[in-house]
Image (tube, rainbow, N blue to C red):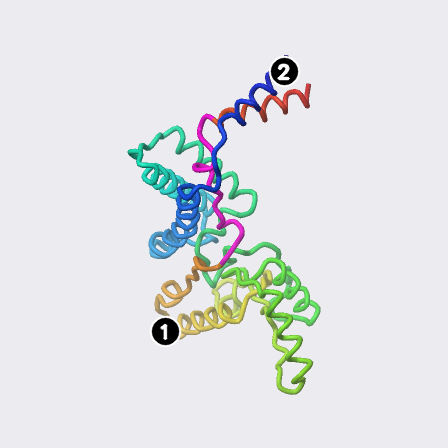
Amino acid sequence: MKTQYTIEMMAKCRNSHIDFMTKEVICSAACGAMTFPAMLGLLQHCLWKPSGVAAHVAFAKTYGFFTVTSAAAASCLVSTTLYDHLHGISPETDAKSLAAFTTISVVHFMLFGNFKSVLPSHVLHPGAFARKYLYIGNYDLDVTNSQRKKIQVIGNKYGCHTCGKIYSPVFYLRRRVLARIFPQHVKQRKLYFADHSPPLAVAKASWRKISSGVLYPQCQHCSNLQASCVRSALNSKSQTLIEKGFVTHASRFKLWKIWFPWPVLTSYDQLVNLSEVCFSSLCNFIW
């Protein structure tokens, strides 16, 4: 009986087929896909940065969840509204369908991203892309060559912990070719700096003794920004550190910024049917 029920439900899903290559589907899917990263960047610049919210604050994952949910809901709303408009149908917002497709979009995001990654970074704290690090037990000792090499490996995999910058294979190839052709003119500079967290200058100037910390990979731009902010803040005792220490990464391409156009490629009824098929298949597998 369970097998027959599963076959019937799958047939029902196939009967409600949607033509994926129509002009309306392509246009509405493209607009929804552009809305998702645009909303993430808009919330970074216009809400979280002015509010002083970054990836290191308490409840950062809650703020990130709100950001992803809002962007997913806006993408679903834009794609479905445009899809109905192109078909000459009066756009109607179904709260149940919107909630279902928004939930699927959030779950899809969780497969590739982290809720903290959608928030801005602050140069004084672990950034939005801080994943792996190296522990250092003594701030008075210089960073060793072995630690620098390990930082390069972490940076090549996860990028700069502040802005998420990862150097492309084309960059490495170009650098290697130029080094072969002009060995005396091409500087072998570090791609990622070993960034102390908390920063070394802040740790030494702190009223409480900070003897240990961690090292994260950081690109040259973010490293220079951090040095400038710390220097001006320590010299002038102003709010420069707070005002200029935020780094946004709205234009940085990441896999989790890709939004899949669920609302225009399927319907709410299909989604329910597919859920029932998956659930019944899982039950047959277990029992």
User: Relative to 158, is 102 above or below?
Assistant: above
Rendered location of residue 210, percent (x, y): 55, 63
Q: Which residue is mark 1?
A: 236
Rendered image quadrant of residue 197: bottom right
Q: Which residue is mark 2?
A: 2
The quarter of the rendered structure image containing the N terminus is top right
- Tell me how many marks there are: 2
Rendered location of residue 255, percent (x, y): 54, 51
User: Relative to 8, is 160 above or below?
Assistant: below
Magenta stretch: give its range: 253-269
Residue at (29, 33) in percent of width and height: 90
Dot 1: element = helix
The answer to whether mark 1 and mark 2 are in CB contact below 8 A is no
Dot 2: element = helix
User: Relative to 192, is 101 above or below?
Assistant: above
Is 171 situated left or right of 15 in this image?
right
Between 254 and 138, the residue placed more toward the observer is 254
Is 173 situated left or right of 196 in this image?
right
Q: Is residue 267 magenta?
A: yes
Q: Give the residue type that dot 2 points to.
A: Lys
Circle 1 Cα neighbour tier, 10 Å, few/some/many (<14 / 14–19 / ≥20): few
How far apart in space, not on screen, are marks 1 and 2 (Cα)?
73 Å
Rendered location of residue 278, percent (x, y): 59, 26
Is 245 situated left or right of 201 in this image?
left
The quarter of the rendered structure image containing the C terminus is top right
User: Relative to 72, is 214 above or below?
Assistant: below
